Amino acid sequence: MNEIRFSSPEEQVKLDSVAADVLRNVRISKGFIIWMGFLLLALAACLFAYIIQLREGLGVTGLRDATSWGMYIANFVFFVATSLVGMLISAVLGLIGYSWVKPISRIAEIIAIAFAAVAGLVIISDMGRPDRFPFLFRFGRIQSPILWDVTVVTTYLVLSLLLWFFPLIPDLAISKNRLQGRPAFLAKIYEVLSLRWEHHESQYRILTQAMRILLILIIPTAFAIHTVTSWLFAVTPRTGWDSTIFGPYFLSGAFVSGTAAVIIAMYFFRVNYKLEKYLTPFHFEKMGRVLILVSIVYIYFNLNEFLVPGYKLKTGDAIHLRELFTGHYAMLFWSVQLAGLVIPVILLLIKQMRKPLPMLIIAIFVLAASWFKRYIIVVPGQGHPNLPIQNVPVEWVVYKPTLIETAITMASILLVLIIITVLSKLFPVIPIWEMAEDGHDKEKLPGNE
């Protein structure tokens, strides 16, 4: 007979304590119903806007011949970027051996699943004929970066789902008999998804091996997903996109937005789910340092992206950079660079700013700036076509998102919030068995005891 983990009284007491703390929030409460009702009503209103677009065509948006990619594609790039945080936290930091990421890893995977799943729907919202989407799989050409993008996004989503589900199996087995007062269907779901887990050491060895394989596989997949997304732009000769460093440029920016999203989620779960024992100031301190590191790397690539063409100053680049630095997009450009990168890095170098509440505020600015950064990448470069545009209305040349376009974009954000809410409310958001095994207070900073 294989040895059963958590067999000693001390281990069982620790397991019971962690399970009680985490499962306290796994319930369909009045607050959950109100929040989900709000999200669903708002989503229904936004989907009505999509019905209008479906009926009338893309003419109801600000997209025209000159600017054919607008808010939708900027949103897609942002979603793909933010989803990479699952790989950064679980795979890179986890494989290095940083045990402090354990209470954060499941939060990162939930964010990765939500953003990667909705990213595909964002692409469909940009299609004037979404009924032709299956043609991509039936008649797609291997030479097309769009086909590569769909393939790697789907692969990354599947791997993220597995990385979320596999460590959840022992937790489901631990929790299935501790759901008194919850709906019966929830206990049934736990029973089915726990796959008859019995906490034998041999099962944990198999799980650990499977997880290590997935963590190794997801790293090149994550690098591919955003590199291929960058190639959708970089393989064109268009001014502003014609860059050989778009791959690492996009990747470094992805780590910034993803880290900010995790920090925001950590604060929410810490406060609203009463998980202060597991999401401690120590973890915010560590995530603050991660955000400093990835932001500095992203600043480096920003300097490369603008300094090199600015030095050569070819005609097209001169027009594009003038629009960004001093022209129509200057206010947005400098706000993004300062509020989303430079100022956060300076603030985070101060130890007191790496506390939970200051980190939340900084992360909100960084995440919002990350979205507008994608907008700056996508839209301005299309305002300088290689061929002159004459005798057309000004709205055909100058892109301005419409109310319909904004509502449909909001629908994708609402879908992300719905997925995160469901996964975090119906399933343990902190890994019970890992925290019971290692102890949530194993690592602390001075003053956190």
Image (cartoon, rainbow, N blue to C red):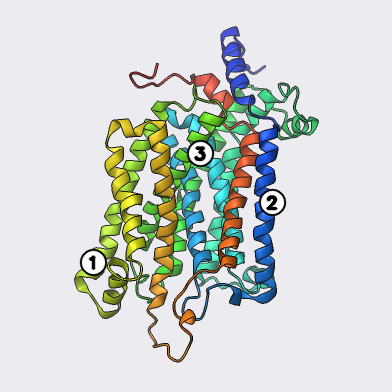
- Residue type, label 1: Val
- Residue 330, position as x, y percentages in the image: 32, 65
* Residue 314, horizontal then vertical, whole percent: 24, 77
Q: Amino acid at mark 2?
A: Leu
Ranked by sequence position, the earlier of labels 1 and 3 is 3
Tag 2's secondary structure? helix
Residue at which label 3 appears: 265
Query: Nearer the observer, disc 1 or disc 3?
Result: 3
Residue density around tag 3, few if under 14, some if 14–19, many if 20 or more, within 10 Å? some
- Residue named by callout 1: 308
Q: Quadrant of the C terminus?
A: top left
Instruction: From the viewer's side, name the closer residue of 8 and 210.
Output: 8
Residues at marks 1 and 3, CA–CA distance in whole angstroms = 37 Å
User: Whole-Å distance between the Cαs marked 2 and 3?
Assistant: 23 Å
* 108 displayed left or right of 244: right
Asked if the residues shown at circle 1 and circle 2 are in contact, with their CB atoms under 8 angstroms apart, the answer is no
- In percent of width and height, residue 104 lies at 49, 33
Question: For the point 47% across and 40% down, which residue is it?
Answer: 264
The answer to which of marks 2 and 3 sits earlier in the sequence is 2
Q: Secondary structure at mark 1?
A: helix
